[in-house]
Every structure is written in C-alpha cells, then in structure tokens.
Image (cartoon, rainbow, N blue to C red):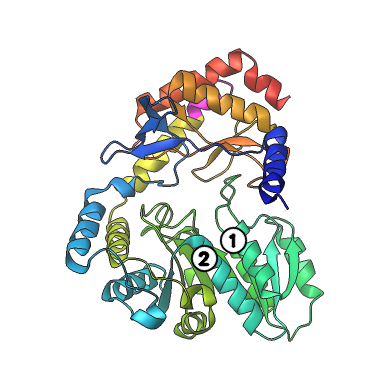
Amino acid sequence: MNFDALFQNQLDTLKEEGNYRYFAELERKCGKFPHAANHQEDGEVRDVTVWCSNDYLGMGQNPLVIDAMCEAVQRTGTGAGGTRNISGTNHDHLLLERELADLHNKEAALLFTSGYVSNWAALSTLGSRLKDCIILSDSGNHASMIEGIRHSRAQKVIWEHNNVADLEEKLQALPANAPKIIAFESVYSMDGDIAPIREIVEVAEKYGAMTYLDEVHAVGLYGPRGGGVAEQEGLMDRITLLEGTLGKAYGVVGGFITGSAALCDFIRSFASGFIFTTALPPAVAAAARASIRHLKESDTERTQHRAQVAKLRAGLDRAGIPHLMNKSHIIPVMIKDPVKTKMLADYLMDEWGIYVQPINYPTVPKGTERLRFTPSPLHSDADIDHLVAALSSLWKQCAIAHAVA
C-alpha cells in the first residue's frame, strides 16, 4: 500500500479547502521584539513586525528572565535528566511550584511540559479516576480540554458557551450524588471574550460541582499580581482547580495546575502525562519563576499593554475596520473565508512587513476564519499606525469588504 499517496491525498484536500497551514520561518532577535527576521525560500532575510505572538508582555525578552535562565544553565546544565518520577525533582521545579501556589493563593501547584499537557493530563485523570464523574464542558473550550475529557471516558455534557442558565439547566438534570466538574476558560483565545466566572462559580457551589478554570490567556495579564481574571474578580479562593501556562504572558514554556495539596498530589500520582514524560529543564523553571516574581510586583507591563490594545482598537475604529468587541487583549478581525484570510495575511507580509497568521479550521469553526491581532506593550505607536494604514489600504481595495460580505 502506498501510504505516502494516502497522506498526500488528504494534504491536497486540505489545500483545496484553503485550510493548509503555511508557517513563516521567523527568527526572534533578543531585544528587538516584536520585530523578527523572516527567512524566505530564496535566502532573503527581512525584518517583519509580529502581530500574533502569545508572548503577550514581551517577557521572553526581559533581561531579568534571560539572566535567570542563563544563570540556571551555568548552575544546573541544560536538561532535567528525565522524568521527575524516576530522576528526581529538581530544586528549581519546587521553587517554581511554590511561586505558582502563592500566585493563585492555593496550597500547591504542579508543573507540566506545556499548557496543552496540563489540561489533557488533569482532566483525563480526574474524569477517569473519579467514579461516575460527569464533566460539563463549555462549548468553546480549547482542544486540549476536549482531548482530556475525551480520553477520560467520563460522561460529557456540553453547555452553551458562557450561558450560565444553560449550565444550570443541565446540572439540574444530572444525578445529585455524582461527582461533577465544570470545565471552562477565563479568556477565550479566538474571540477574546471573558467567562462570567462569578455566576459559574455560584452555580457550581449550588450543585456541589468542582470548578476547573483554564487561565492560560489571562495569567500574568489580569489581576493586581497577574493571577488572572479570577484574581481580578476576587474569586481565586472559590475555584477548585486553576490551570495556566508559562508559555504566553510569562514568556517561557510549560503548563501548571494549582489547587489543594490533596488535588495536586492526586494528579501527580495518577496522571500519565506527568509521570511518563521528561520534566522541564531547571533553567526553564528558573526563568519562569523570575518572570512570575517580576509580574507579581510590577504593573508597568500590564498598564502599557492595556494602553497599546486600546490604541489599536481606536485606530481600527477610526479606519472603519470592524473587529470583534470584547474586554480582553485579543483583537479578531473576521474574514470568514479561509482562502481570503490567507490572501490578506500574505499581502500584509509581502507588502507591509506585517506578520499575522491566518486563523482557520480546525482552530476556529469553518466560516469564522479571521486575522487575530495581539498587541503587546512593546509595539510602538508607530507600529500601530503602520498596521492600521496597511489594513486601511486593504479595506479601500475592497479585499476585506468582499471577504466579510
């Protein structure tokens, strides 16, 4: 059997649908963020401005974070030496877990190799190990949460996105004595909308359900110490399990959960995604800890971030370019066609030196393709003006107008 032909047939279909993903070859330059070097196929290298990074605060370029990683490499070497289960827990891992527990006012925390893995491992473990568990999942949840729930083989109930009345209606129909987990996010990464956390928590408490909150697009960015939207709203103590990432606003890599000591030890003891994978390098843990400690004390980055987000929104409004309104830092410009979305992204890159990755299926449902802009505090006013001018040029040429019609 010609397996390569089978592979190629599906790839060709993906390309015909406009959903094949082309990755720009970028080289981040220390101290230059959000600018990067774009390596092209013909060997040419040019400067581009990145508008779709999840390094939301530019902490991957922060000297404190860089110095902490370099110091740890010199002190411990480059790798962790294996799984924590076999090779032992490095001191830097424990220091970071204590930092995370303090950040979220919880008894304990547990590190994972990515935010995807922390969601997958935690939800699959909870759903499979709690007898007769029922997981109520917001319909807008991330793929990592969906995969974790699916892998758990627990009963799954999907409730309408951010619809607390629908959530309560579904809870009412479930057995009162069954363990129930309500899984949802604070900031949804594609539309940028924010969950009604207080109302969800109140419903959860009413029906004795556990709350599982994904704050990957909020930690570092919201709350007086960067604890996320739950901290901003004074609700951290009412969330059972809070999950986050070190790879976005904190500028490093890795995922984590926080909660009670018993909960974190339960996941540590039963989650295959923790037990059987090599731990994060100690230098990564040290850098993440430095980033968290800095953002606990400094509000400078968050203040400037909010200012640049507001400036971009205002610029788009003045130019008559519609974008999804939300209360977060994520600015989606809807195109609603995969081919046209890529065409616009290519034009921005080729003609204006602006890099924004087209967002299409399966990241978003078909028919909701978009350009997703994420301003950072390191995007200058000139960067914003340049982006608005580029989009205005496209709009006047009717490229976007035809796309969203």
Q: Residue at x 17, y 67 (%)?
A: 75
Q: Which residues are magenta?
A: 314-321
Looking at the image, which is closer to me, 277 or 100? Answer: 277
Q: Is residue 270 visible?
A: yes
Instruction: Say above or below: 333 vs 329.
Output: above
Instruction: Say above or below: 313 vs 146.
Output: above
Q: Is residue 118 magenta?
A: no
Q: Is residue 6 left or right of residue 352?
A: right
Q: Quadrant of residue 382?
A: top left
Please give the residue where the numbered disc 2 appears in the rendered image.
Answer: 117
Tell me the chief SS of the magenta region: helix
The amino acid on which the numbered mark 1 sits, given as a three-letter code, is Ser
Q: Quadrant of residue 368?
A: top right
**How far is disc 1 from disc 2 in space, using C-alphas?**
7 Å
Q: Is residue 190 left or right of residue 385?
A: right
Looking at the image, which is closer to me, 244 or 161? Answer: 244
- Contact (CB < 8 A) between labels 1 and 2? yes
Instruction: Say above or below: 175 vs 114.
Output: below
Q: Is residue 77 left or right of residue 132?
A: left
Quadrant that contains the C terminus: top right
Q: Residue at x 61, y 44 (%)?
A: 191
Q: Is residue 234 visible?
A: no
State which tag comes first along the sequence, 1 or 2.
2
Please give the residue where the numbered disc 1 appears in the rendered image.
Answer: 144
Q: Position of residue 118 (x, y in %)?
A: 51, 67
Q: Is residue 318 magenta?
A: yes
Helix, strand or loop under label 1: helix
Q: Position of residue 261 (x, y in %)?
A: 44, 83
Q: Position of residue 210 (x, y in %)?
A: 61, 76
Neighbour class for label 1 at 10 Å: few (<14), some, many (≥20)?
A: some
Q: Position of residue 343 (x, y in %)?
A: 60, 25
The amino acid on which the numbered mark 2 sits, given as a three-letter code, is Val
